[in-house]
Amino acid sequence: MSRQRATAFVPGHVTAFFSAHPDDRPVAAGSRGAGLTLTDGVTVRVSTTDGSGAAAAAVEPRTIRGEPGTIGAVEDALGALGVTAGERVGADGVAVAVETDLPIGAGFGVSGAATLGAAIAANAAFDCGRSENELIRIAHEAEVGRGTGLGDVVAQARGGVPIRLEPGAPGVGELDGIPADSRVEYVTYGELSTEAVLGGDTTALSAAGERALGRLCEDPRLPTLMAQAREFAADADLLVPEVATAIEAVDDAGGDAAMAMLGRTVFAIGTGLSDAGYDPSICRTDTAGARLVRDAECE
Ligand SMILES: Nc1ncnc2c1ncn2[C@@H]1O[C@H](COP(=O)(O)OP(=O)(O)OP(=O)(O)O)[C@@H](O)[C@H]1O
Ligand SMILES: CC(C)(CO)[C@@H](O)C(=O)[O-]
């Protein structure tokens, strides 16, 4: 039997500001807030392992950029879909390859993207027959359950510049968006642990996030999103020195920058960081959201 496989692309997502809304039901837990989805994202390739039978099932390769590596939420999503050796996949094992140029843990929602991408690709590879909303819900529940994100999955599924009006997966949460398309630049100085921030007291952070969302809804434009992001980072006491310096430099050069939640990352719209003398990574806002893509090896 030929190998079953499929590949999905999911945009990165930088959160500009957010409020945390825990709930006993993962489908209803999530965040309110806003951010940008990016053409820089995560490609996930799901396939049956090469070979057949028990030996293949015993080795279920998981790679991140070609190196062995796992993301807990990806495993949970595959389990929820029932694509594990011996279930839908028969005697073969399932291989998952995550490719991304984005840094992990630095505020780009790589774990949410990898999880949604794995769900979309596995559904196609193994003919699970789930709808888009069902796949988003599976990925959202897995991500929230692991504490690695709250609102990234629903934002990444939508694309564009999502506003998360109500927390939760499709059917519970509610999304809107800023109708904008922009060049985006970013520079990363390192990780900030999402689990640690979400596991701490989020009262002040969430109050700041709710204020920012109210103001953005009154004026749903990119410059307002960026201004509210800067205010949020300061009010929530999350701003780190390297990012503060870069935001100030961009401001001095007449640009618009803010900190990506939750990472030691500064992002700017337009040429803000280049104009301030930085050497940033460059992409755009993503327009399409999470999607299946052609598998290069099948062409
Ligand atoms: N090389 C790696 N560096 C960091 N995390 C890794 C790596 N390999 C696997 N992981 C797993 O990937 C997940 C990263 O989740 P995390 O929420 O910290 O990052 P993110 O989704 O990229 O960022 P953010 O939530 O800040 O936007 C964790 O579950 C971690 O265990
Ligand atoms: C919590 C979070 C900032 C982590 O990246 C994100 O998932 C969000 O905005 O909900």
Image (cartoon, rainbow, N blue to C red):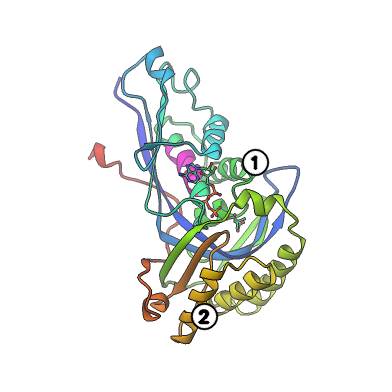
Quarter location, residue 96: top left
Q: Which mark is residue 248?
A: 2
Quadrant occupied by the C terminus:
top left
- Is residue 114 highlighted in magenta? yes
Report the amino acid beneath label 1: Gly
Instruction: Compute the Cα span from label 2 to label 1.
Output: 36 Å
Residue at image point 73% right, 58% down: 202
Residue at image point 41% right, 12% down: 54
Q: Is residue 99 visible?
A: yes
User: For the magenta stretch, what is the residue range?
Assistant: 113-121
| Lower sequence index among marks 2 and 1 | 1
- Is residue 56 highlighted in magenta? no
Front-lying residue, 242 or 76: 242
Q: Which mark is residue 263?
A: none
> Relative to residue 202, is residue 283 drawn left or right?
left
Describe the element under mark 2 as helix, strand or loop. helix
Q: Is residue 159 visible?
A: no
> Relative to residue 290, is residue 152 drawn left or right?
right
